[in-house]
Image (tube, rainbow, N blue to C red):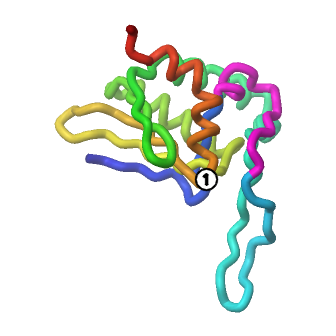
Amino acid sequence: MTRFTLGGFGMCVLTGALLQPQELRCCVPLAKNEAGGTQNGKMITTQSPFYCNMGAYTPEQRKRKNELDKAFRSTAQAFHELANGYEFQFPADVKSIQTIAEWSAMERTCCPFFDIDLRMDREGGPFWIQLTGKEGVKQFIQADFKVITEQLAPQK
């Protein structure tokens, strides 16, 4: 198994950003921003506000992000609910892996509060992106990925 973890801050995915990328979505506030640095010899980390900042992109980047968001929605094949988030399966071909990896890197720019793992199982097995994070992230995904999860839900 190959696993990539992108950054200490992680990433996010939101249908709001996927469907209306020019919009700044404020969702569930988690923790107040704290100044980064040290206090009494202990590292203090900054908690990102719980919203997607689409204003972080240039117009060219926003256009590319829209294309990647569309690819994310259209190529997702399955999903699993996790204790602190979700994971989504994609085709394991080179183009899909490159597209979702680029999508992940761009998500990091606007939404630094998710943890993202890209996983390629051995022997040509499935390719997964796992979205997890701090308290509230799973509920955020449930709301903002509803379009994707409903599309992938088993038919009754």
Q: Is residue 106 visible?
A: no
**Relative height, residue 42 to residue 50 (above, below):** below
Q: Quadrant of residue 60?
A: top right
Q: Position of residue 44 (x, y in %)?
A: 70, 75
- SS type, badge 1: loop
Q: Position of residue 101 (x, y in %)?
A: 48, 37
Q: Residue at point 75% right, 72% down?
A: 36
Q: Quadrant of residue 87?
A: top left
**Relative height, residue 132 to residue 154 (above, below):** below
Amino acid identity at mark 1? Glu
Q: Residues within 10 Å of mark 1 (few under 14, many from 20)?
A: few
The C terminus sits in image quarter: top left
Q: Residue at point 65% right, 50% down?
A: 113
The residue most toward the front is: 156
Q: Position of residue 103 (x, y in %)?
A: 56, 33
Q: Is residue 137 left or right of residue 39?
A: left
Which residue in the protein does label 1 denote?
Answer: 135
Q: Is residue 95 left or right of residue 114?
A: left
Residue 114 covered by magenta stretch: no
The residue most toward the top is: 156
Q: Is residue 41 left or right of residue 121?
A: right
Q: Residue at point 74% right, 44% down?
A: 28
Q: Quadrant of residue 14?
A: top right
Q: Position of residue 71 (x, y in %)?
A: 53, 20
Q: Residue at point 47% right, 38% down?
A: 86
Q: Give the magenta range.
A: 15-29
Q: Is residue 55 visible?
A: yes
